[in-house]
Image: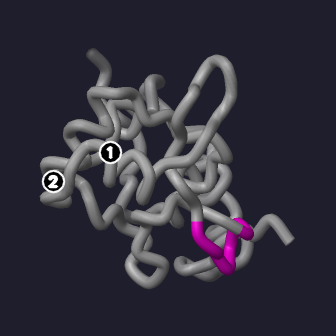
Amino acid sequence: MAKNKYDCLKCSAYCCSYTHIPATKTDIKRLAKYMNVSEEEARKKYTKKGDKENPRVLRHTYDEHFTSSCMFLDKETRNCTIYDGRPKICREFPTQTRCGYYDFLMFEREVQDDPEWIATTD
């Protein structure tokens, strides 16, 4: 497999702002174990109703850059607070060898001459 050409630690966690971050039954079980709560409590507290394709999705909270993002994203460090308990989709993302948002972000940071610059959705 090709080596990733991006560094998620330099990103503003754009993928965590996706509206529907699926949480499967296995994900909820993993999250419950990680948070030391029952599966039912994890389902109610950390997920909400999704759609037909993804019946349960992770809850969001306010985010100054993307309006809302995953409730488990640390808004200061932009890192996952449940990294070892994160859902499968987060473990596999991105599925490509390049992340389009990361490429865009690095380009904009160079153009803006600001290594901390973050594009917002406002």
| 97 drawn magenta | no
Q: Amino acid at mark 1?
A: Glu
Residue ID at (59%, 47%): 103
Residue ID at (48%, 65%): 71
What numbered label is drawn on residue 34? 2
From the top left corner, tell me how far across and down residue 104 is, in percent: 67, 51
Q: Nearer the viewer, mark 2 or mark 1?
A: 1
> Please, is residue 12 above or below residue 50 in the view?
below
Looking at this view, is 104 or 22 the one in front? Answer: 22
Mark 2–mark 1 CB contact (< 8 Å): no
Image quadrant where residue 4 sits: top left
Looking at this view, is 44 or 19 the one in front? Answer: 44
Determine the CA span between mark 2 and mark 1.
14 Å
From the top left corner, tell me how far across and down residue 38 is, in percent: 21, 49
Query: Which residues are the magenta region?
Result: 61-67
Q: Amino acid at mark 2?
A: Tyr
Secondary structure of the residue carrying tag 2 is helix
Provide the residue designation for mark 1: 40
Secondary structure of the residue carrying tag 1 is helix
From the top left corner, tell me how far across and down residue 108 is, in percent: 70, 64
Image quadrant holding the N terminus, namely top left
Q: Residues within 10 Å of mark 1 (few under 14, many from 20)?
A: few
Residue ID at (24%, 54%): 83
